[in-house]
C-alpha cells in the first residue's frame, strides 16, 4: 500500500540520499515555501505540499545526470504514492524529464524551485540577509543574468506563465514564503 510521506518522513528520506548541507537546506527551504503557498491556495494540504517540496531533489546529489528519473525509481521502491512521484518528477519538466506539471501544486513547485535559489543567493549578499529584502531588489537580481547564473530565469518565467501570474507576483509570493 503506497503512502504519502509526512514532512518529517520526507526529510528523513532526503537525508538518506543527500549528505551535503546545502542540498538538505534547499530541500527544507523549498518544502517551507510550498507549505506556505498551500496555506494560501490549497488549505489543509500544507503537509502534502511541504513533503513534495522537501522530496523534489531527493536524487540530485547522487545521480545528477539522472535527476528526476532516478527520483521516480527511488520513490516507487519506497512505495511512495504515485501523485507524489509525479509531482516530484514534474519539477524537471522540459529540462531532465517529460513529466508535465498539471496540478496547481506541481506548477508552483516547478516555478519556485529555481526562485528560492536566486532569492537565497541574494540574501547571502546582504548584510541583513532576508530582513528588509524587497521584491524590487529580487527583480533587479532576476534581470541580472550574471547573478546566480545557475538559477534558470527561463524556468522561473515559464513557471509564472503556467500559473497565469507575472514573474514579479511569483517573486513576491516566494519572498514572502521564504521570510515567513
Image (cartoon, grey):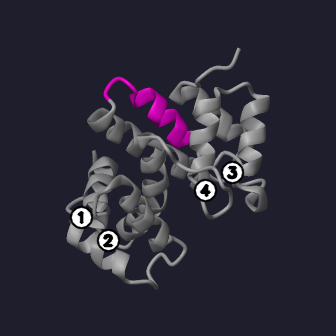
Label 3, label 1: how many angstroms apart (C-alpha)? 32 Å
* Mark 3 / mark 1, whichever is N-terminal: 3
Provide the secondary structure element on which disc 4 rests. loop
Q: Which mark is residue 133?
A: 1
Label 2, label 3: how many angstroms apart (C-alpha)? 33 Å
Label 2, label 1: how many angstroms apart (C-alpha)? 9 Å
Q: Which residue is mark 2?
A: 126
Label 3, label 4: how many angstroms apart (C-alpha)? 6 Å
Mark whose residue sits in front, 3 or 1: 3
Label 1, label 4: how many angstroms apart (C-alpha)? 28 Å
Q: Which residue is mark 3?
A: 68
Say which of 146 and 126 sits in front.
146
The span shown in magenta is 43-54
* Mark 2 / mark 1, whichever is N-terminal: 2
Mark 4 neighbour density, 10 Å: few (under 14) some (14–19) many (20 or more): many
Q: Identify the residue at horizontal 74%, vertical 50% (top origin).
A: 69
Q: Position of residue 20 (x, y in %)?
A: 66, 53
Quick check: can you spot residue 118?
no
* Mark 1 / mark 4, whichever is N-terminal: 4
Q: Magenta part mainly helix, strand or loop?
A: helix
Q: Which residue is mark 4?
A: 92
Q: Is residue 93 above or below residue 35?
A: below
Q: Are marks 2 and 1 in contact (CB under 8 Å)?
A: yes
Say which of 43 and 131 sits in front.
43
Label 2, label 4: how many angstroms apart (C-alpha)? 30 Å
Amino acid at each position: 500500500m503506497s503512502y504519502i510521506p509526512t514532512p518529517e518522513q520526507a526529510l528523513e528520506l532526503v537525508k538518506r540520499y543527500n549528505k551535503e548541507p546545502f542540498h538538505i537546506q534547499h530541500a527544507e527551504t523549498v518544502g517551507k515555501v510550498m507549505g506556505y503557498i498551500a496555506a494560501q491556495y490549497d488549505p489543509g494540504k500544507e503537509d502534502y505540499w511541504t513533503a513534495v517540496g522537501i522530496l523534489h531533489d531527493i536524487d540530485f546529489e547522487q545521480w545528477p545526470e539522472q535527476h528526476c528519473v532516478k527520483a521516480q525509481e527511488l520513490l516507487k521502491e519506497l512505495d511512495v504514492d504515485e501523485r507524489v512521484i509525479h509531482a516530484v518528477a514534474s519539477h524537471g519538466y522540459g529540462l531532465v524529464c517529460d513529466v508535465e506539471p498539471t496540478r496547481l501544486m506541481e506548477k508552483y513547485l516547478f516555478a519556485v524551485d529555481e526562485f528560492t535559489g536566486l532569492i537565497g543567493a541574494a540574501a547571502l549578499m546582504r548584510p541583513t540577509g532576508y530582513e528588509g529584502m524587497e521584491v524590487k531588489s529580487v527583480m533587479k537580481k532576476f534581470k541580472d543574468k550574471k547573478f546566480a547564473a545557475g538559477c534558470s530565469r527561463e524556468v522561473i518565467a515559464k513557471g509564472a506563465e503556467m500559473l497565469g501570474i507575472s514573474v514579479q507576483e511569483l517573486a513576491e509570493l516566494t519572498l514572502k514564503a521564504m521570510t515567513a
